[in-house]
Amino acid sequence: MEEYKAAVTTYRNLLKDFPGSRYREEAMLNIFKSMYFYAERSVPSKQQERFRDALDAYNAFVASYPESRFIKSIRNLRDNMPVEVSSAAI
């Protein structure tokens, strides 16, 4: 449905309300993916800022789940970010 901002809010609320949830990894993954796709589909004047926010979500995910089975797929998304944004990645 491409309601990326709503998805981010929903997943953040899930993490806030249920910090020990067994779905924490997937919620953090979906926060990053939603932020990435939101940035990708944004107007050019907003993209850089939104990609930076997505990169922050990526870094938080990788810091929390460095051995996640999803690392490879989200690294591909990170690598597709504009060079000036993705060069700040870990």
Image: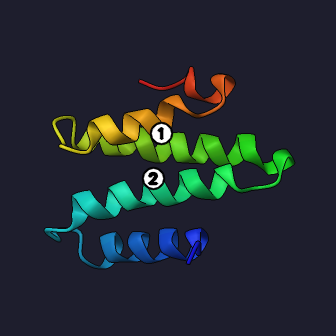
- Which mark sits nearer the N-terminus, 1 or 2? 2
Marks 1,2: beta carbons within 8 A: yes
Per the image, label 1 sits on a secondary structure element best described as helix
In the picture, the quarter occupied by the C terminus is: top left
Q: Picture quarter containing residue 11?
A: bottom left
Residue found 56% across the figure and 27% down from its top = 86
Task: Say which residue label 2 marks.
Answer: 32
Residue depicted at 21% across the width and 35% down the height: 66
The relative height of residue 21 versus residue 57 in the rendered view (above or below) is below
Q: Amino acid at mark 1?
A: Leu
Residue 82, given in percent of the width and then of the height, sits at 66, 30
Q: Quadrant of residue 88?
A: top right
Quick one: 38 or 63, which is closer to the camera?
38
Type of the residue with mark 2: Phe
On screen, residue 80 versus residue 16, left or right, reads right
Q: How is the image coloured?
A: rainbow
User: Which label sits on residue 7?
Assistant: none
Task: Judge by depth and name the residue closer to the eye, 18 or 90.
Answer: 90
- Label 2, secondary structure: give it: helix
Residue 77's label in the rendered image is 1
Q: Is 21 situated above or below 49?
A: below
Q: Is residue 26 above or below residue 16?
A: above
Q: Nearer the viewer, mark 1 or mark 2?
A: 1
Q: Residue at x 39, y 61 (%)?
A: 30
Percent x, y of residue 6: 55, 77
Assign the N terminus to one quadrant of the image: bottom right
Q: Residue furthest right?
A: 45
Label 2: how many Cα within 10 Å (few below 14, some 14–19, many 20+): many
Q: CA distance from mark 1 to mark 2?
A: 10 Å
